[in-house]
Image: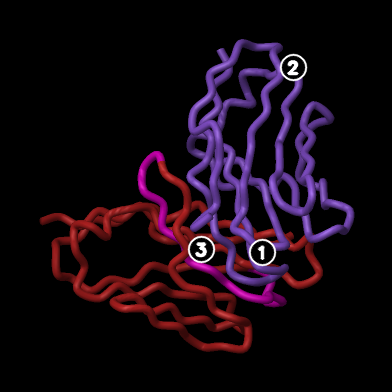
Chain colours: A red, B purple
Amino acid sequence: KQEVTQIPAALSVPEGENLVLNCSFTDSAIYNLQWFRQDPGKGLTSLLLIQSSQREQTSGRLNASLDKSSGRSTLYIAASQPGDSATYLCAVNLRGSARQLTFGSGTQLTVLP
Amino acid sequence: GAGVSQSPSNKVTEKGKDVELRCDPISGHTALYWYRQSLGQGLEFLIYFQGNSAPDKSGLPSDRFSAERTGGSVSTLTIQRTQQEDSAVYLCASSIRVNTEAFFGQGTRLTVV
């Protein structure tokens, strides 16, 4: 059974700092990995999708990397801003599964002004 | 529409009543998913629809839960004889096809009293 772990569970940083969020998964046979953010009381907003054949994806201040062989992904946020405060979730799409996403429990990020 | 639309956004119901939750996916998206997010829990897969294929119901927690997708577009999740443990946020997502980027709605917060 695929298990997805996110560390740390919570993170608080001062504005302007660069930071890294970690995601690990137990089964490397994935189609892709997706990073989301969730604001309190809201749905999920897709940030980046990395295909299994890719090493990284970038969007603005965000950069996500994927090391499928070691079962790890990182989300790098440059020059963090208070508006980045949210819960960040990673999810893997497992080959041969029921086409469902398996989610980590998230990292709750607070960026202090 | 521009995004995945869910209604109602909030629903309070008495224990034992039936409820229907609606999801309107992004136009042209053939894959549709339902997830549940309970307080302090991760996202739990419920059911998946892909085109005209039989849905994957492997995540439905009991036979009180059912879902349908009419005409390959709008989906309705029905919970019969609601219980307090059904209280959660129910999230719908769609993607243009299986194993592509998933886009989530804002969710329906269900409270069973």
- CA gap, disc 3 and disc 2: 33 Å
Chain that bears disc 2: B
Q: Mark 3 vs mark 2: same chain?
A: no
Tell me the amino acid under the disc marked 1: Gly
Density class for disc 1 (Cα within 10 Å; few <14, some 14-19, many ≥20) is: few
Write down the residue under mark 2. B81
Tell me the amino acid under the disc marked 2: Arg
Percent x, y of residue A22: 43, 68
Residue at disc 2, secondary structure = loop
Write down the residue under mark 1. B28
Percent x, y of residue A20: 33, 71
- CA gap, disc 1 and disc 2: 33 Å
- In the rendered image, residue A36 lying in the magenta stretch gets the answer yes
Q: Single out the mark in the foreground, 1 or 2.
A: 1
Q: Find the magenta span and give its range.
A: A26-41
Count of numbered labels shown in the rendering: 3
Image-quadrant location for residue B81: top right
